[in-house]
Amino acid sequence: MTFNEDANIGGSKARRRGRTAAIAGGGGVGVIGIAVLLISMFTGQDLTGLLGVGGGGAPQPQGGGAIIEDCATGQDANENDDCRLVAGAEAIDQFWAENLDGYREPQLIIVDEQTSSQCGVASNATGPFYCPPEETVYIDPTFFGLLRSQYDASAGSLAQLYVLAHEYGHHVQNLIGVFQEHPNNGTGPDSNGVRTELQADCFAGAWIAAMTEQEDADGDPYLEAPTPQQIADALNAAAAVGDDHIQEQSGGQVNPESWSHGSSEQRQRWFDTGREGGVGACDTFSVSGSQL
């Protein structure tokens, strides 16, 4: 995935909040810590406990933080993880504005070390997450370095945008009432938590399929078409956060009854379902458990 170097990504509403940025992994996170981290990777404070929160009402912003002003062009996005997320958010917002009536943009917070939210502390140790009552996505870019160094994940440029698009998928679910219609009903391979996560993966895939269609204010596409290797990298990220893979890597037995996010195979398959069929193919709540 490469941004067009001349693409205009200035004017973002993204903010930077927290203390001075820390180097990922500096304090050392053990295997069990990484497993817990990855289990909550896309929801931070365990979205299964948040599904009853929100539901499309007016957000309650946490506020604060400095507007990010040092990301101006696609070249900045190609060279800097922070700018890549800022630029990715611009394109994802445009995609959803075109595909969802009444879409409103979430707040994006780039976390420096850690900051507080209504859903708990945001840091690279909790991983990226979406906080429904604030309608805010929190993400510390040093998290990607932690994945590379301690969990053997490639976490390349498109994988990073897949993570971001997944979190924006949770925002869309919040807006359309998924959290209210399908509240937390525990864990398991057929649980609402698994269906919610797989739908967010599917939404991410739908955006990636259309990512070259979003344009800046000058009519220039933000992004070039992803290469097969970049798609493979995104699929690698989806597999890395499968419940079965996490359980295997942490030394335990694979126990589907404890799943809250879905298996590696499911996460990759629903990501591809979105890429191939678009947003309309992402209804994970109308299929049987055997079809998930």
Image (cartoon, grey):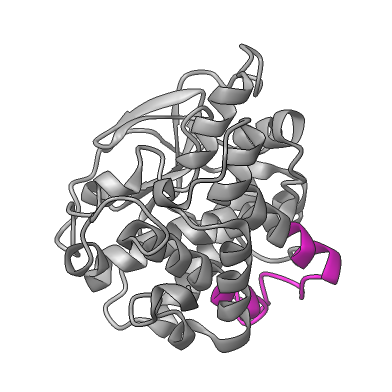
Q: Name the residue rendered at 57%, 66% in the picture.
A: 266
Side of 219 relative to 108 (left or right): right
Q: Is residue 214 left or right of residue 78?
A: left
Q: Is residue 175 shown above or below 80? A: below
Q: Residue furthest top?
A: 27
Q: Nearer the viewer, residue 104 or 47?
A: 47
Give the quadrant of residue 190.
bottom left
Magenta stretch: dominant secondary structure: loop
- The quadrant the N terminus occupies is bottom right
Q: Position of residue 64 (x, y in %)?
A: 31, 33
Quarter of the image holding residue 207? Answer: bottom right
Q: Is residue 128 magenta?
A: no
The residues colored magenta run 205-233
Judged left or right of residue 209, residue 164 is left
Rendered view: 82 above or below 251: below
Q: Position of residue 82 (x, y in %)?
A: 61, 42
Q: Is residue 38 above or below residue 280?
A: above
Asked if 120 appears above or below 8 in the picture, the reply is: above
Percent from the top left, x then y, of residue 76?
Answer: 72, 50
Q: From where the camera sits, is residue 5 visible?
A: no
